[in-house]
Image (cartoon, helix red, strand yellow):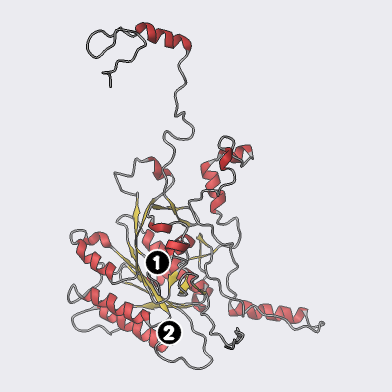
Amino acid sequence: MSFRKRNADQQPKLPPGSRLSAYNGALLISTGVPSLDDILGGGLPVGTVLLIKEDRATTYAQLLLRYFMAQGIASGHQCALASLDEDANELLRNLMWLATSDTDVDDHEEGSKLAGGRNARTGDDRLKIAWRYAHLKKFETGVRTASPQSPPPTPSNTSDKNKADTSSSSSSSSPSTTTSNEPRPYCSLFDLTKRIPESVLDESKATVLEPTAAGIQDESGDDYWALIQDIRKLIVENNFSSALPAPPNTTRNVLRVGIHSLASPSWQSKTPHDLYKFFHALRGLLRFSFGAAVVTIPAYLYDESPNFIRRIEHMVDAVVEVESFAGSKIHNEASYTQNYHGFFYVHKLPVINSLLPPSTKLSVLSAGGSNDLAFKLRRKRFAIETFHLPPEGGVSERRTEPPPSSSDSKKEKKSTPRRIGCGGSGVPGKQDPLEF
């Protein structure tokens, strides 16, 4: 047997902003939310469809879709957004953008400020009572986020920097270096208070899919058929299909498809089965292409026919649901609403090239199939954490009663009557064998 040394230059290069799964070797892209990536097993596999069931009273599902699109622009992917309920161009202009410093978004600092922990007041993290647990792993309910990265350089900024480097290094013999070959980030840290610059959005590869305005729909008005034709055209013309040979010396890129509020009353179709045909065709297109899709659907509109949504769940690769506490009479007065804003349910996880989901081995939040998750929306970030109830009675209130004094115990002994007859022993201090 002979062995050959692996040459890194001859290996096929991964698309920018992607990585391979450590569990099954699938190509992954980030959703923009580190905790959601952890639940999915490291990220969303390329060639899959993620379905997000919307909430009745809030727009948290739209926020996750905006994270997905903003991460695609930061990673240099081509993004395509479709919506008939809202203006897709306005959704792209309202995308969040990158945090520039550690103090912008630091969930650990905000968590310590909200909790007002006693360790912060004393300055000592060691356990005082249960000393035997001091060397165990610290319990954490969330996923640590990566350090913020600088925004990707635009061509104008790169040219200006090259001019400055050339002028500064004219006297030196070493040539100036550019930042155009820097690797794109896999998962960035976003700040909800910032909006994407228009210059970055104009230079990005973001397109808007308008199935009704494109003139592709037939006479009956099938928006689903028109949308799938737009996606198929986008995949074929931009070399995203893995079934077709790519031109030589071309680097593969990733296509991100975002569909907002699919199956709402704004979408027209000939028959109720057109939606099933759309998901079947979309899944078949993405299976043989370098692309992934995130679709939000108002599932609460179909509560009277639960089999309708259940059939759609079988036709996608991953299904998550967002249930907020806003407008709920059951959860509105609960104590845990101070720490969380709603529950996060995981109904289905993507399984590619394996028998079990990668999250069973790699996930911190949902390892072992646990589904006790909740989310919180802070001023600058969205996070999914393990749900736990607060201490009963609060932290500031006493949850135990003081022991009775000696005088009180004497009064109780004097006031206790002597039990006579069946059910009570006549001897004081002796337990009756018939007493339960």
Secondary element under disc 1, as helix, strand or loop, is loop
Front-lying residue, 58 or 2: 2
Residue 135 drawn at (x, y percent): 59, 46
Secondary element under disc 2, as helix, strand or loop, is loop
Q: Residue at x 51, y 42 (%)?
A: 115
Q: Is residue 16 above or below residue 358?
A: below
Q: Is residue 219 above or below residue 266?
A: below
Q: Residue at x 56, y 85 (%)?
A: 11
Q: Is residue 270 above or below residue 338?
A: below
At label 1, counting other C-alpha atoms closer than 10 Å, the crowd grade (few under 14, some 14-19, many 20 or more) is many
Q: Is residue 376 left or right of residue 306?
A: right
Residue 103 drawn at (x, y percent): 60, 55
The image quarter containing residue 276 is bottom left
Q: Residue at x 18, y 77 (%)?
A: 270
Most extreme residue toward the bottom is 248
| Label number found at residue 357 | 1
| Label number found at residue 311 | none
Tell me the quadrant of the picture where the N terminus can be found. bottom right
Labels 2, 1: front one: 1
Mark toward the start of the polypeptide (2 vs 1): 2
| Label number found at residue 240 | 2
Front-lying residue, 30 or 70: 30
At label 2, counting other C-alpha atoms closer than 10 Å, the crowd grade (few under 14, some 14-19, many 20 or more) is many
Residue 93 visible at all: no
Residue 223 drawn at (x, y percent): 26, 77
Q: Is residue 299 left or right of residue 361?
A: left
Q: Label 2 sits on what residue type?
A: Phe
